[in-house]
Amino acid sequence: MACDQPVADAQMLCAPCWNDIDLIDGTTCDRCGTGMPLALKGRGIIHCDACLSVPLTWDRGRAAAIYGGSARSLVLGLKHGDKPNIAVALGRWMCRAAADIIAESDVIVPIPLHWRRLLARRYNQSAELARVMARETGLPHGPHLLSRPRPTEMQRARSASDRARNVRDAFTVPPRRIKDVAGRRILLVDDVLTTGATLNAATAALRASGAASVSTVVFARVPHAAEI
């Protein structure tokens, strides 16, 4: 999935790529999914220092891997390499990482693309991940509960404040879908968490339409500055 080495199955990694992926396991921050010291296990809901100081607005969050190495190759292959089948393995890893949140969710909603970008890319990588997660868990998949009517520039190489401005008010719940969001516990799905600007903006739109809670799961999260 991440390189050109032969493997026995299309949903496998070769040994070097497997050794180069940093899957998140054990005790994690309840907001961004980063790994936390084992000594904090059993202390209830915990947040990392970054999430205590940065306004991430969703309720709970999980990530399957750290963005880098093979995880970065997988994301780029899914997002820009025309390899939607990669979503099968990534979605299963995300189900494992977010098992406790999935058990408390009513519907899985992917971060949508603007229609112009969807035409150019031909598929929405977040919707592919959400579809796999819905199939694996039995939860409903709600790809039409959230829309992106306003086109936005690419987030790459932007500062945190620029990212937030770029996606502010970019998402909305279509009027005919508000009844399907109101009172529901939403699990919002994306491929990568960097500053949280996109997920924050989507969370705001879902809450404005009456969502009972909004939690998030991504395949990979970019390390906080203190972790690099």
Image (cartoon, rainbow, N blue to C red):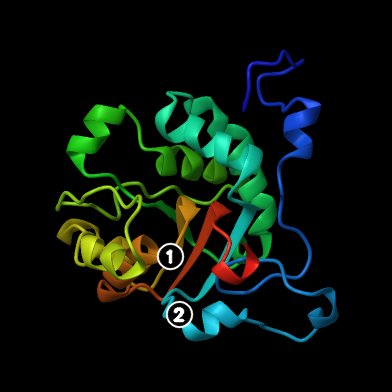
Work out which residue is located at the far right of the displayed protein and give it. 39
Q: Is residue 220 left or right of residue 115?
A: right
Which residue is under mark 2? 54
User: For numbered disc 2, what is the local secondary structure?
Assistant: loop
* Of pointers 2 and 1, the one earlier in the residue sequence: 2
What residue is rendered at 34% in x and 64% in y?
159
Report the front residue among 223 and 185. 223
Q: Are marks 2 and 1 in contact (CB under 8 Å)?
A: yes
User: For numbered disc 1, what is the local secondary structure?
Assistant: loop
x%, y% of residue 175?
Answer: 16, 61
What residue is rendered at 49% in x and 85% in y?
53
x%, y% of residue 83?
Answer: 48, 24
x%, y% of residue 8?
Answer: 77, 15
Q: Is residue 224 left or right of residue 58?
A: right
The numbered dot on residue 17 is: none
Q: Is residue 68 left or right of residue 152?
A: right
Q: What is the quadrant of the C terminus in the image?
A: bottom right
Which residue is under mark 1? 195
What residue is rendered at 76% in x and 25% in y?
14
Question: Distance between the Cα atoms at labels 2 and 1?
Answer: 9 Å
Report the front residue among 60 and 132. 60
Q: Amino acid at mark 1?
A: Thr
The answer to whether residue 172 is visible is no
